[in-house]
Image (tube, rainbow, N blue to C red):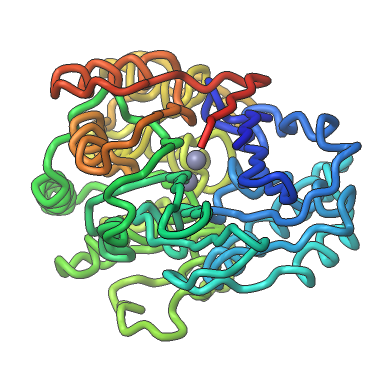
């Protein structure tokens, strides 16, 4: 087996792994972009190779954002993912095109490349094994995280009664949320995996219990409403947006949802009775939601993109509401450095914050700002417990910054895990003898 890391090794973004499970078969797993600058994984390395299959673990752009580019360069490749991953990828990839057009800058792929990619998608059912060569089978396995997200299981037959197993986790979570159940226990034979390639986004953290964190958010929102203040909750479009909205709606809190998050919510509402009456959508409003809601006498709760308040309606509501001490900005997700969201988290009441592009271009913050941990990734102790139970001979840690890797490494060693644990690095190649 050969594994080559083309992106997403020692970083969170541009995930792309090349895998050769047997001599005849070339597989690529994920093809994402770096969200900070839209850059690609090392697709050039694949140029002289025939790739038989591309599997996409889930719809987030750090896993699927470069897939149309890959597809246009590899017309020979079969493309597989779950149905819900295809729906989410379609919404996010189309939005990327739209944003590039609006900002009048070139996009990574054209509309026709995007259409070609979507047309070539073959739907993979969760838990169903499919043969990709004489000796090798692949299966998508529920990974929690967001709707449709899967781990990729690979098994290769080596003569009578002998089998080798490899697994790529994709993004992984063991905790149930309102929109998705935690990762399903692996099929029995995979409780002995030879090679595990795992994410470790939160490897350095021990997260608080999700239920109590959800309850804390509900309580805090109700407190702000009781003092007649508005609440802004900036969210990422897929996963956290719907989870946060449903958590609040089910607790009896009426809220407005905006941005791309509404589109994703509607796409997931087809077989869903959780399309909750307490969730109202911006698109139902006739007129600009900021003008209509920001000065409302009624206290409003707004759940909208972008997640780090760099753009979109969340930035505009933050600009309007930050100055009033009755209001609150509750931040449920990770904030990258040098974003408005990160600046907001570090603010102390009375500090000034820059709002580039808006008038006035700075505001004095008096609103309450608080972080909540509603992560869609397993933390260090959860990952380590799980890896210990799967007992892989090789562990390759990807999809993490240095501290994520180190955190997971520490947790594993603390549990007496003695097998190989290595860090994936972009450009690095691993070979495993079966
Ligand atoms: Zn993800
Ligand atoms: Zn990811």
The foreground one among 171 and 268 is 171
When the figure is inspected, residue 281 is found, relative to residue 215, above or below; the finding is below
| Residue 356 rendering spot, x and y as whole percentages | 61, 24
The foreground one among 301 and 23 is 23
When the figure is inspected, residue 403 is found, relative to residue 164, above or below; the finding is above
* Residue beneath the point at 41% across and 15% down: 352
| Residue 351 rendering spot, x and y as whole percentages | 35, 14
When the figure is inspected, residue 301 is found, relative to residue 346, above or below; the finding is below
* Residue beneath the point at 27% across and 60% down: 188
| Residue 412 rendering spot, x and y as whole percentages | 22, 23
For residue 12, side relative to residue 233 (left or right): right
The foreground one among 10 and 62 is 10
| Residue 311 rendering spot, x and y as whole percentages | 59, 39
For residue 83, side relative to residue 163 (left or right): right
The foreground one among 330 and 293 is 330
For the image, the number of numbered tags is 0
For residue 290, side relative to residue 2 (left or right): left
Residue 271 makes an appearance in the image: yes
* Residue beneath the point at 38% across and 61% down: 142
Residue 231 makes an appearance in the image: no
Q: Quadrant of residue 146?
A: bottom left
Q: Quadrant of the N terminus?
A: top right
* Residue beneath the point at 90% across and 62% down: 112
Q: Quadrant of residue 209?
A: top left
When the figure is inspected, residue 289 is found, relative to residue 334, above or below; the finding is below
For residue 187, side relative to residue 49 (left or right): left
């Amino acid at each position: 087996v050969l594994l080559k890391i083309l992106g997403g090794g020692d970083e969170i973004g541009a995930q792309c792994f090349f895998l050769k499970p047997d001599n005849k078969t070339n597989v690529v797993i994920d093809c994402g972009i770096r969200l900070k600058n839209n850059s690609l994984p090392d697709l050039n390395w694949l140029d002289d190779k025939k790739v038989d299959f591309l599997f996409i673990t889930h719809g987030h752009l750090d896993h699927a954002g470069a897939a149309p580019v890959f597809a246009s360069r590899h017309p020979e490749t079969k493309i597989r993912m779950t149905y819900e991953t295809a729906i989410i990828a379609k919404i996010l990839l189309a939005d990327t095109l739209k944003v590039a057009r609006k900002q009048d800058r070139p996009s990574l792929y054209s509309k026709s490349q995007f259409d070609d990619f979507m047309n070539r998608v073959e739907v993979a059912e969760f838990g169903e094994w499919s043969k990709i060569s004489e000796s090798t089978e692949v299966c998508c396995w529920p990974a929690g995280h967001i709707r449709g997200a899967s781990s990729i299981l690979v098994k290769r037959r080596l003569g009578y009664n002998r089998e080798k197993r490899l697994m790529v986790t994709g993004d992984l979570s063991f905790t149930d949320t309102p929109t998705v159940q935690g990762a399903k226990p692996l099929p029995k034979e995979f409780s002995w995996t030879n090679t595990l390639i795992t994410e470790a986004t939160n490897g350095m953290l021990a997260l608080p219990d999700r239920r109590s964190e959800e309850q804390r958010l509900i309580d805090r929102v109700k407190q702000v409403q009781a003092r007649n203040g508005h609440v802004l909750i900036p969210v990422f479009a897929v996963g956290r947006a719907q989870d946060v909205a449903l958590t609040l709606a089910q607790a009896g809190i009426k809220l407005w949802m905006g941005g791309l998050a509404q589109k994703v919510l509607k796409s997931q509402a087809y077989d869903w009775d959780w399309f909750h009456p307490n969730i109202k959508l911006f698109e139902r409003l006739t007129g600009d939601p900021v003008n209509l809601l920001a000065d409302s006498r009624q206290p409003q709760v707004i759940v909208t993109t972008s997640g780090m308040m760099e753009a979109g309606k969340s930035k505009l509501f933050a600009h309007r509401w930050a100055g009033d001490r009755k209001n609150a900005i509750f931040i449920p997700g990770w904030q990258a450095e040098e974003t408005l969201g990160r600046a907001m988290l570090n603010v102390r009441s009375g500090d000034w914050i820059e709002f580039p592009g808006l008038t006035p271009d700075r505001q004095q913050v008096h609103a309450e700002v608080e972080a909540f941990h509603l992560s869609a990734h397993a933390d260090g102790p959860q990952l380590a417990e799980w890896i210990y139970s799967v007992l892989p001979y090789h562990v390759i840690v990807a999809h993490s910054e240095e501290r994520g890797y180190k955190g997971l490494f520490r947790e594993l060693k603390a549990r007496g895990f003695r097998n190989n644990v290595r860090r994936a690095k972009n450009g690095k190649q691993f070979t495993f003898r079966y």
